[in-house]
Image: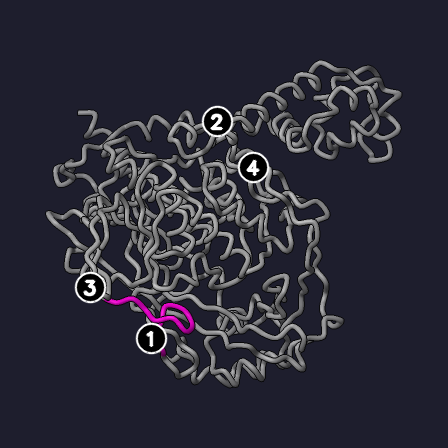
């Protein structure tokens, strides 16, 4: 019934979809196995993509030839560039999306991707021969062979849904959990544990009083995620902001004695940076109120996502507390919030390609690796799909460095440090974030992806054109001088030092309180000379000039650190021979088996002295 496939992807969430698309676009014959064909690329939680650091990841996926940025742009109902008041290293794009349109566009793109087949069934067992993944066995008993398998199981592995004292087996509301895989993998020596996440109630937008809330509009200019010429949203839907108060908190506290979290029925650790409303009240008892974002789920639906009100309290407590929130007095609940507990595997058991160390040709991506978030899952998916294809074709793996991409930071953190709680990406996790901006992801990654055959000709052509325009703009700004009489009145108006003689335009751009656009507005001749260039290229030229010293400084640090990154540790290195290592370092080195001294230095619990000792021993 089934031919042999090159790659089987188990699960069609954000990680699975990107994995299937990447492997297929590189030439592999791919089978995407999902428990429900109607929930491909489902936005299980909030209907949004991007945000702080996450937006950078989506742009990196797009630059690599992935689909997440394109689908996000095609389903946008609101766009905002976050952190615009800060430096460009912190700017982060975010879209509010139409939940149903997002999923349907993803499915449409996958169906139009040659080499992708679909099958609706659950996978209960892997076919493993000689410690190598060779296919899957489904619940209907089908044995499907493959050269490699990518597991992207999300929250479905032995998933349990908690609502107050109720426990329901499931990987998502109204969808059954997946069993069998965890137990089989544990029998092969992999270590699993439990994590939890949660989601808020959904309510009927017709029952809300928006006049009692703050309106939150999108940006006037919709920049979007994709570097391709994707149609941007011409209209936008507003979101709203409201707040809890002491009355809401008091009602929620009445349900604490029936909370699965406080009664110990949930074993897994939840996301620190996206706590439930009951956790917020408990941990931040001094806070009189907590912010809630009232987010529409799409263009043609009245369903509302109450961001910030994630909870697993009894349904009646949720309902009573919610109706005390300003604007929610007459709220009608579509469905309650719930917590979900599921299996994951400690990611230190993986290599940098996301292949398991215990079983060859078996790859993990997404929440199975202990991460949380669509974006974190999607970027692991594209990397697992790429590396599965490369491995079965005997090609060198693709490993992104921490200095090359947020994707590299995320994977290195997981592989080197592991995680005891759902891992979420932040800009603070990236030590080279001035290099890893959202605006230059295409310049950083497209050529690399193009050489792999993933990014198409159009992407490479657009990057070449962008580079050409940026360099031309920089050349003009470095060579054109501005007369004092043209600019001094403006400089005085913003309390910036005036100039007494002609000054190069690039030197004025360096001033922190002046934008390139402001300079162009007061210098008609200069404006004419750069006219015809894309706004994106003008912004890129301005950033490169304004932050040149910071960028160069980070590049110098990268070069210095390369010395450690390039010192390889033999795969079978005998750490027991290095007598002076601390006990913790010895244990961590033997378990994680770092590939380089650089990776060894980033392992939690390893001191600089341990790395120095290891370096000296290897030098001998």
Q: Is residue 324 above or below residue 141?
A: below
Mark 4 or mark 3: whose residue is earlier in sequence: 3
Q: Is residue 64 above or below residue 343?
A: above
Circle 4 or circle 3, nearest the eye: 3
**Residue 169 shows which numbered tag?**
1
Q: Secondary structure at mark 2?
A: helix
452 sits left or right of 479 in the view? left
Residue at image location 13% in from the left, 37% down from the top: 574
Circle 2 or circle 1, nearest the eye: 1
Magenta run includes residue 348? no
Magenta span main SS? loop
Q: Secondary structure at mark 4?
A: loop
Q: Please say whether residue 441 is visible from this viewpoint.
A: yes
Q: Secondary structure at mark 1?
A: strand
Q: CA distance from mark 3 to mark 1?
A: 22 Å
- Contact flag, marks 3 and 1 (Cβ < 8 Å): no
Q: Please say whether residue 380 is visible from this viewpoint.
A: no
Depth check: give the residue in front, 485 or 516. Answer: 516
Would you name the residue on which mark 3 appears?
141
Q: Can you give x and y, in whole percent of width and height, for residue 422 in the image?
A: 40, 58
Q: Secondary structure at mark 3?
A: loop
Circle 2 or circle 3, nearest the eye: 3
Q: CA distance from mark 4 to mark 1?
A: 41 Å
Q: Is residue 418 above or below residue 480?
A: below
- Contact flag, marks 2 and 3 (Cβ < 8 Å): no
- Contact flag, marks 4 and 1 (Cβ < 8 Å): no
Please tell me in which quadrant of the rendered image residue 395 appears. top left
**Residue 227 shows which numbered tag?**
4
Callout 3: few (<14), some (14-19), or many (20+) C-alpha neighbours within 10 Å?
few
Q: Which residues are magenta?
A: 168-179
Magenta run includes residue 174? yes
């Amino acid at each position: 019934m089934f031919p042999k496939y090159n790659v089987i992807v188990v699960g069609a969430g954000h990680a699975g979809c990107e994995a299937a698309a990447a492997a297929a676009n590189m030439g592999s014959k791919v089978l995407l196995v999902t428990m429900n064909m109607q929930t491909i690329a489902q936005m299980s939680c909030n209907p949004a993509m991007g945000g702080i650091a996450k937006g950078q990841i989506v742009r990196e996926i797009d630059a690599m030839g992935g689909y997440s940025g394109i689908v996000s742009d095609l389903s946008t109902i609101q766009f905002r560039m976050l952190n615009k008041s800060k430096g460009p290293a912190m700017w982060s794009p975010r879209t509010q999306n139409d939940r149903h349109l997002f999923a349907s566009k993803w499915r449409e793109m996958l169906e139009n991707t040659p080499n992708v087949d679909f099958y609706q069934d659950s996978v209960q067992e892997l076919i493993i021969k000689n410690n190598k993944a060779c296919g899957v066995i489904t619940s209907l008993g089908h044995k499907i062979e493959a050269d490699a398998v990518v597991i992207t199981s999300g929250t479905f592995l032995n998933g349990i849904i908690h609502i107050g004292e109720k426990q329901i087996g499931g990987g998502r509301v109204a969808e059954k959990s997946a069993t069998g895989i965890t137990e089989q993998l544990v029998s092969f020596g992999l270590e699993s544990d439990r994590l939890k996440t949660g989601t808020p109630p959904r309510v009927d937008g017709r029952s809300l009083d928006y006049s009692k809330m703050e309106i939150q509009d999108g940006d006037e200019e919709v920049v979007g995620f994709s570097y391709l010429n994707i149609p941007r949203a011409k209209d936008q839907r507003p979101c709203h902001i409201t707040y809890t108060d002491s009355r809401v908190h008091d009602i929620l506290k009445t349900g604490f004695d029936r909370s699965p979290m406080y009664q110990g029925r949930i074993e897994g650790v939840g996301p620190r940076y996206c706590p439930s409303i009951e956790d917020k009240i408990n941990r931040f008892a001094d806070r009189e109120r907590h912010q809630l974002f009232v987010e529409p789920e799409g263009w043609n639906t009245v369903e509302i996502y109450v961001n910030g009100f994630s909870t697993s309290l009894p349904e009646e407590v949720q309902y009573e507390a919610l109706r005390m929130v300003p604007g929610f007095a007459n709220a009608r609940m579509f469905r309650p919030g719930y917590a979900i507990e599921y299996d994951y595997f400690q990611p230190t058991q993986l290599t940098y390609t996301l292949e398991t160390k215990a079983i060859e040709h078996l790859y993990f991506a997404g929440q199975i690796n202990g991460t949380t978030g669509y974006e974190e899952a999607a970027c692991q998916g594209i990397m697992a799909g790429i590396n599965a294809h490369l491995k079965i074709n005997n090609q060198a793996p693709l490993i992104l460095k921490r200095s090359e991409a947020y994707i590299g930071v995320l994977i290195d953190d997981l592989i080197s440090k592991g995680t005891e709680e759902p891992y979420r990406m932040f800009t603070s996790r990236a030590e080279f974030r001035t290099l890893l901006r959202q605006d230059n992801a295409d310049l950083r990654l497209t050529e690399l992806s193009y050489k792999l055959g993933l990014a198409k000709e159009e992407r490479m052509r657009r990057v070449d054109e962008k580079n050409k325009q940026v360099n031309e703009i920089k050349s003009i700004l470095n060579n054109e001088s501005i007369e004092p009489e043209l600019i001094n009145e403006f400089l005085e108006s913003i309390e910036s030092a005036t100039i007494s003689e002609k000054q190069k335009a690039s030197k004025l751009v360096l001033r922190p309180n002046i934008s390139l656009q402001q300079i162009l507005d007061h210098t008609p001749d200069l404006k004419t000379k750069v006219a015809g260039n894309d706004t994106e290229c003008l912004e890129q030229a301005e950033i490169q000039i304004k932050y040149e010293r910071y960028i160069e400084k980070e590049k110098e640090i990268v070069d210095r650190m390369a010395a450690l990154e390039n010192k390889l540790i033999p795969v079978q290195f005998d750490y027991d021979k290095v007598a002076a290592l601390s006990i913790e370092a010895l244990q961590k080195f033997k378990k994680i088996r770092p590939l380089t001294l650089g990776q060894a230095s980033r392992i939690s619990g390893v001191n600089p002295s341990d790395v120095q000792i290891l370096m000296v021993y290897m030098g001998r």
